[in-house]
Image (cartoon, coloured by chain):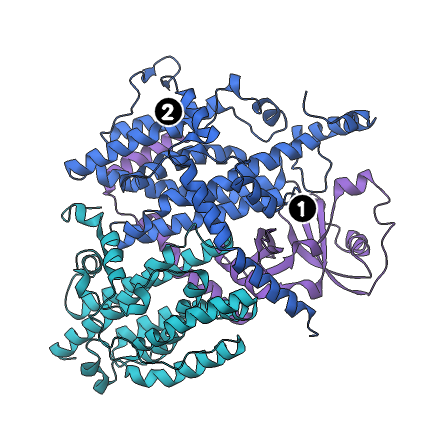
Chain colours: A blue, B purple, C cyan
Amino acid sequence: MYGATVDEIEDAAYDDKLAEFEARIARGEKIEPGDWMPDEYRRQLIRMISQHAHSEVVGMLPEGTFITSAPTLRRKLILLAKVQDEGGHGQYLYHAAETLGATREEMLEALLSGKAKYASVFNYPALSWADMGAIGMLVDGAAILNQTMLARASYGPYSRAMIRICTEENFHQRQGEDIIITLAQGTEEQKAMAQDAINRWWWPSMMMFGPHDSDSKNSEILLRWGVKTRTNDQLRQQFVNQMVPKLHKLGLSVPDPDLHYDEESGNWIHGEIDWDEFWNVIKGNGPCNAERMAARRKAHEDGQWVREALEAYAARQEAQPA
Amino acid sequence: MTDTQWPRWLVFEQSSEKSHHTIAGSVHAPDAELALLNARDVFVRRPQVISLWLVRADRIYSKTAEEMANNPDWASDAEPGETETYLVFQKLGHRGKHTHAGEVTASSPPAAVSAALEALPGSGRQEPVVWWVVPDRLVYRSTEADIAEMFEIAHSKAPIRDQGFFLTKLKLRQGIDEYDEDDHE
Amino acid sequence: MNDTQKQALAAYLIALGDDELILGHRDSEWAGHAPILEEDIAFANLALDEIGHAVVWYELASDATGENPETHPNHLAYFRDVHDFRCVQMVELPKGDWAYTIVRQYLFDVAERIRLTALAQSNYPPLAEAAGKIKGEELYHLRHSAAWVKRLGLGTAESNIRMQHALNELWALAHQLFMPLPGENDLTPDDIVPVSANLLPEWEAVVRTAFAEADLTPPAANTSPSRDRSVHTPYLIDLVTEMQKVARLDPDATW
């Protein structure tokens, strides 16, 4: 079942409304706030969009640790601009979720209490400068495939946020590739650094596409209602096909002994993903879950007096006669 | 203690003299001046803006074409208030974005939508699918002076996000670019 | 300009660049840790501007002494010994709480605006031109930090106390901005740069008015603990070590 509530089923018009809603999606129309939508559509979107927003905001942290030690002034400016963009993308996405009636207070509360999820990939540590390259190339590379698909999502505000993000995100992957290319052409130590970073970020990036289609409980409904237009496994295959030749060209290897090219399908076939690790990190046992949440909580708590002070100031200004 | 993330302000951006103000997204801010500064930092990271308008999200009155079709009496409970100027934003067609379409004079938000349906019916092929109205007095606008002080300066940072700012040796870069192009076939 | 003046100008510009680079470094530490998402983005913007200005000053310093403006700025940032930095102590100190960050930024932004206005009149055209360009961004910073000073000063009892506390700590330190910069005395006779001390009255007038409007009072003591920009706090050592640690893994490598 698609999560229709009892009230809705009792509503005689519900089936008609649902049919019309699905017909609109089939016609390629965008659903806007105010339009009729099934509760489950709203619920799934809020879950998905807020998770996406949290990922952007938590995603500022691993790269943020290297802003202060980027090895050239140019790299420092580029990385700062990138981390700033991530904050901006978080903003665009919270906005899209807010149009569905979720408040940012609620969404942050869900994040900080551990109820809401964010991309598990950010629970891995950034250990060396080469990680800035690997994150940009692999993590952003994976994200772009997902975001390009979501730019066609049936919900108008989500789709618009994604279109804006996609036009900005290319720069992110570019700067990552640029770092990896530079290191891959550098000294032996730099090459080793790049390879080490690729080794550590490859599998977490592969996991970003989510569980296999057969294990993805939300996929069917999201596809049916035009939120997603491609499955997790389809996107993952596209990622592998894109990345493997690039890495090989750079003289870097992919840490997957089972990886091979399949002439018939033209696909690079990857080995099995360690799903135990995947679920374990999702459950909060990744190497950096606690650290990331502690950082967000501290920022939130330390900022409380600031937010209150400005609210108090604004309230007093409004109360004063002009 | 309960958290506050401050009220939400919708941000409308104008990219050139020829274009109209279009929805960009929203920012949270305690007041209009900080909303303008925040909107600048969020939405003018890449220079494409000559003017920003800010409106508290809860001051916008919204009707979609679908809502009005499903409930023909939608305007019946409007309580007339002060007659004033309303700004009208329309989303034209399903691919469109909410864009400033003009002004109407009305005594309530629903009346403003009704007036806009008459006065600003859209352009044949592109039917409005969403209507937003807001009293003109509730719109906070960047000024002429802000163009130099807030928007034009963003140009100096544009190169940071440009490919030219990267370093990598051309040959390998080209190799990868060619690969990317094949990929997009 | 004669050779002495060229050297003097380079020293002066490097000091200005160091102020911007180190303050930009502190600003960048807020990215991901600010009180609200909007300010994560705003402070990344500030950091981008400040570090961008450091690059402009370093490039100009390189030009003055015939160094390569492509590579020399990186050398200045990454391969100078910490004791060769010439920033004021105020910008070295840890970022502190949000009130401390805002007060420091505001005190710096006003001083910067006044100095840039003077530098835009420099007899050395490349300097005048660069100052004119940077000034636009500094005006925007000032608008942001001034808005925050007012709101936090008048917000709640707690925010007012925190702001007052930050002002007490920073007020005397800020006066170091008006001590002569390295090279300054060789440059002022030809109106290449202003006499720093002459900028102080306007700065005082502006910031005192703003603090008064925000219900904040600068403390009586206004003598900078250090006149000399070669004397640093221990915090600078940590900051510079952090900043240089990747670049120094292999100084000959391309990053």
Q: How crowded is mark 2: few (under 14 residues within 10 Å), some or many (20 or more)?
A: some
Q: Distance between the residues labelled 2 and 1?
A: 39 Å
Q: Nearer the viewer, residue C38 or C69?
A: C38
Q: Residue furthest top?
A: A264
Circle number at residue B92 = 1
**Quadrant (top left, top right, bottom left, bottom right) of the N terminus of chain A:** top right
The verdict on a common chain for dots 2 and 1 is no
Callout 1: residue from which chain?
B
Q: Quadrant of residue A189?
A: top left
The kind of residue on which mark 2 rests is Asn
Q: Which of B48 and B119 is in front in this view?
A: B48
Q: Nearer the viewer, residue A231 or A104?
A: A104
Q: What percent of the width, then of the height, locates residue A212? A: 48, 20
Residue to which mark 2 is pinned: A241
Q: Residues within 10 Å of mark 1 (few under 14, many from 20)?
A: many
Q: In which quarter of the image is residue B84?
A: bottom right
Q: Quadrant of residue A275?
A: top left
Q: What percent of the width, then of the height, locates residue A104? A: 59, 47
Q: Which residue lies furthest to the left in this view?
A: C3
Circle number at residue A291 = none
The kind of residue on which mark 1 rests is Leu
